[in-house]
Amino acid sequence: MARSLVWIPFLLGACARPDWRDDFDRLQRESAALPAARDEAPREPSTDTDLDRVLLQPLDLPTLISLARARNPELREASSRTKAGIEEVRRAGSLDDPTFKLETEGVPLRHPGSLGLAQDSMAGLSQSFPFPGNLALRSESASRDAEGLHQRYLERERDLTLRMKRAYLDYYAALRAIEAHDEHLKLMEATEKISDAKFRTGAVTQQDVLKPQLEQVLLHNEVLSMEQMRASSRAAINTLLHRPPDAPLGEPREIVPADEDFNQSELLARAAQNRPELKAAELRVKSSQARLRLAERERDLPDFSVGVDYWQVPGGPDAYGAMLSVNLPWFTGKRSAEARRLEHELRGDEAALDGVRARVQFEVRDAWLRVQAARRSALLYKNELVPKTGQTVEVSRASYEKDKSSFLDLLDAERSLRDVRLRQIQALTQYESAVADLERAVGADLRRKP
């Protein structure tokens, strides 16, 4: 009896659709290969000598992203929930536990402990079965839910990648802004020497010597906010890497301005295929459809139980008994209400899917427009504004040394150069950030190097 029961789940799943089984097999392979699936990842923020050695080298953004995907606790949480969803598929596709019973009848009340005086004793085994096909629908619904959990993992992975890129860009911008201020300080020191020499000859007043000194004090004050930005962005990177916030980091590599052109139609098509939120919404609809089909079947078709008993009768021949029982789902209305509830849930999931589609299209278009604008701005600073402003400073310095212009003209030119360089850094990081937003909106890497 027990050996024959092993085959019953396979018979009950004979009408299962093969597509979800293939998807489930693929899900198991993909979830097992995730970097965050490793159980040996630390639970507490920690440092590692080899890791510190790597991160003290010039920072490479792809390396940071790879490390974050393996170490970040948010991804490990999402990976564990996907594993739980996979186990739920196995649980949903399994039969209820069989029941074994021992029973005795007719024990005299005067001798309650004398089981040998019983009229008969029996041992029984019974098993409940859903109507053929229902077990497969339960598995299908759970499998779609598990796939949705996997898509939520991918969504978190994309969010983590975007956060790492933004933190890296902030770190880069802070360090480059400090360097720009240092260069301007050197200009002010050189200007101070020129003004001091001219003051000693009586060509200018002492005011021309004091103004460069005041400008240097103001620059030192501005550097303080840049240092705070560098410390905050370093803490953000370390937190995403699951390291102490003050753990050491090297300097970021230089970002080379890219001249790229993204096709909006192609991006929209890729987003429709790759965006995790969109796939998750589609899977919720499929799961609701499977649950609705199951509820309709349970409303119309009964489950059943079978059992067999072995009787031992003192003084008489042994015997057996058999049992078949079915539930009657047509009388209480409970099953009908459940089917109607799931139908409403399906309509809601379909509406949610439409909303996600519209949001994805908007986010792709919005990010694409910001990329185009930031790209033009970055190229304008690189090719036009920075070279021309630098030439203006050289001309102003030469004129000031020859007493053909005032110190204020030179100071204004040097301030303009500093501001233009700072804005160039800002324009470059804004472009990189806009591309990161575009990749997040599309749900795929756009095969570019930051």
Image: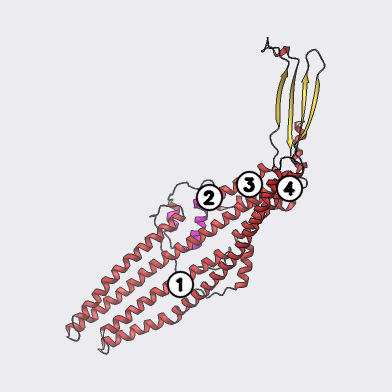
Residue 161 position in % (x across, y down): 51, 60
Find disc 3 in the rendering and name its residue: 86
- The residue at the point 29 percent across, 68 percent down is 221
In percent of width and height, residue 333 lies at 71, 43
Magenta segment includes 392: no
Q: Amino acid at mark 1?
A: Leu
Q: Where's residue 109, x and y in %?
A: 68, 12
Q: Which residues are magenta?
A: 51-74
Mark 3 residue type: Ile
Which mark, by number, is residue 428?
Answer: 1
The verdict on residue 64 being magenta is: yes
Rounded to the nearest whole Å, what is the CA distance between mark 4 and mark 3?
Answer: 25 Å
Which quadrant would residue 382 be assigned to in this image? bottom left
Specify whether 84 is left or right of 293: left
Q: Secondary structure at mark 3?
A: helix
What secondary structure is marked by label 2? Answer: helix
Quadrant of res 443: bottom right
Residue hosting label 2: 76
Spatial CA span between label 2 and label 3: 15 Å
Which comes sooner in the sequence, label 4 or label 3? 3
Residue picked out by circle 4 = 296
Main SS category, magenta section: helix
Dot 4: element: helix
Pick whichever of labels 2 and 4 is earlier in the sequence.
2
What's the distance in space between the residues labelled 3 and 1, CA to CA? Answer: 44 Å
First reached walking from the N terminus: tag 2 or tag 3: 2
Mark 2 Cα within 10 Å, few/some/many (few <14, many 20+)? many
Query: Mark 1 or 4, which is nearer the eye?
Result: 4
What separation in Å lies between label 1 and label 4 (alpha carbons)? 58 Å
